[in-house]
Amino acid sequence: MRQTLLMLIGLSLGACAFAQEAEVVTPYEPTRESVVFNARGANAPLLQGELSLPRRPDAYFTVPGAVICHPDPTTGGTMDNPVVLEIRDRLVPLGVAVLRFNFRGTGASEGRHGNGVGEVDDVLGALAFLREHPTVDPDHLGLAGYSFGSRVATMAAARAPDVRAVASVGYPTGLGEVVITDWQFLGAIERPMLFLSGTEDQYSSASNIRALRREFELEAWVVPIEGADHFFSDRGKLSLVGVQVAQFLAMHLFGRL
């Protein structure tokens, strides 16, 4: 009887221990939350964004983070752009936290349009927000941008040497011969870069991007998307963009966590 009782107590304690262990490892499911943060620089405006966190084993588990920059707000670009959303939706399941936000003067973000200069401070503010977030590993940050946002992202990367990788979609080089002096900031980027450009893009040229890669000796992959224009309105091509950007960033953001 005593032996049976001890065995039952042992089983009961084992069950409790198992329940406690199961409670500890129960994963936190993906979340999205509205956030606000300040841009960098003088008179920094308050910016509106959304932080998406991936599934993780507990609330304190840190993950890599990426900022996604939207296209030109003067032509209707916002953080709700389909390319931005596609990249987010592909990155989060890979375990990367994603911050998308509206540039100054766009949506609920304060301030006025900065002509592609003030917006660099917006990106630097977004990176600072990720660095300070308790769930994000500040040593594993990346940048992605589309169209206007891709140029701004690379300009910000030139001033943020801790960014590990940069992905650009529809990099707006124009179709004419590229003017090298307009892109001098690229010389400060010594990290892996990905450039995706549709073969029918009205504002981006893969050959111009290759010229910039040669001029500044960039560690860059230039990938043409056959038949795609600047807007990636075809669902299949949009999906391809999201997959390639997400895989590229995840490949360079994970490791030595």
Image (tube, rainbow, N blue to C red):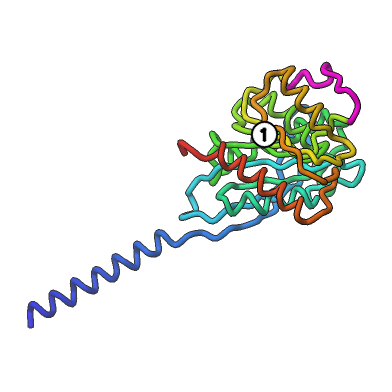
Q: Quadrant of the N terminus?
A: bottom left
Nearer the observer, 196 or 13:
196
Residue 176, magenta (yes or no) = yes
From this view, report whether residue 240 is shown above or below residue 157: below
* Residue type, numbered disc 1: Val
- Image position of 238 (left or right of 20): right
* In front of the other: 1 or 218: 218
Q: Is residue 158 magenta?
A: no
Q: Is residue 61 left or right of residue 237?
A: left
Foreground residue among 230 and 22: 230
x and y, in percent, of residue 157 in the image:
69, 28
Instruction: Give residue 78's position: percent from left, percent from top.
Output: 82, 47
* Along the viewing direction, whichever of 180 and 68 lies nearer the viewer: 180
> Can residue 134 be seen in this snapshot?
no
- Range of the magenta residues? 175-186
The residue drawn where x is 44% and y is 62% is: 26
Q: Residue at x 80, y 21 (%)?
A: 183
Q: Residue at x 55, y 60 (%)?
A: 29
Height in image: 17 above or below 98?
below
Describe residue 253's horizontal placement relative to residue 212 as left or right.
Answer: left
Q: Position of residue 174 (x, y in %)?
A: 88, 30
Query: Few, some or many C-alpha atoms within 10 Å of disc 1 (few <14, some 14-19, many ≥20)?
Result: many
Quarter of the image holding residue 164? top right
Residue matched to label 1: 166
Residue at the far left: name it. Answer: 2
